[in-house]
Image (cartoon, rainbow, N blue to C red):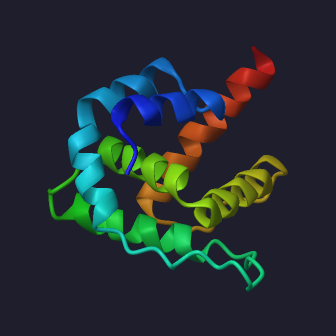
């Protein structure tokens, strides 16, 4: 798992670092690390082609939503946990990037998307819009 400083550097490198995101990382890092460790992700697939569906991302978000609903995690901490998972898993990073591209091209997020997915993708879309428009 990445350190707090390494995550901030990764977010900056990928254009995802905002003042709000950095504050969320500082405030909720410990809880986000615990939450990320509780999210099972499929093992890296080296020989099998990457599947185009957002399955692992939405599954991770649903697990984080359950922690939020149980009062064990705040939604901002869930978003930081997703950043940690994305930074540490290439397959998940590719899956989220493809989903972000779909959203930017005008395709809507599924109506039943988990709250953590909506919050995470909303934050990354806002960052992208700021970078393009700013």
Q: Position of residue 59 (x, y in %)?
A: 47, 74
How many numbered dots are placed on residues in this image?
Answer: 0
Vertical relation: 52 (above or below) 6: below
Q: Position of residue 26 (x, y in %)?
A: 30, 27
The answer to which quarter of the image holds residue 109 is bottom right
Vertical relation: 52 (above or below) 129: below
Compared across the picture, whether 16 is left or right of 19 comes to: right
The answer to which quarter of the image holds residue 70 is bottom left
- Identified at 46% across, 74% down, the residue is 41
Where the C terminus falls, by quadrant?
top right
Vertical relation: 78 (above or below) 57: above
Vertical relation: 16 (above or below) 101: above
- Identified at 78% across, 81% down, the residue is 49
Observer-nearest of 39 and 125: 39
- Asked if one can make out residue 7 in the rendered structure from this viewpoint, the answer is yes
Compared across the picture, whether 101 is left or right of 82 comes to: right
Outermost residue on the left side: it is 71
């Amino acid at each position: 798992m990445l350190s707090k400083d390494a995550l901030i550097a990764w977010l900056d490198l990928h254009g995802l670092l905002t003042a709000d995101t950095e504050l969320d990382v500082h405030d909720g890092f410990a809880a986000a690390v615990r939450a990320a460790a509780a999210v099972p992700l499929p093992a890296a697939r080296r020989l099998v082609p990457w599947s185009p569906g957002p399955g692992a991302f939405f599954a991770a978000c649903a697990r984080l939503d359950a922690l939020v609903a149980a009062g064990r995690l705040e939604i901002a901490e869930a978003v930081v946990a997703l950043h940690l998972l994305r930074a540490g898993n290439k397959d998940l990073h590719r899956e989220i990037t493809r989903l972000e591209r779909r959203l930017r091209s005008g395709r809507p997020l599924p109506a039943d998307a988990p709250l953590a997915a909506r919050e995470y993708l909303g934050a990354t879309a806002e960052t992208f819009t700021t970078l393009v428009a700013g």
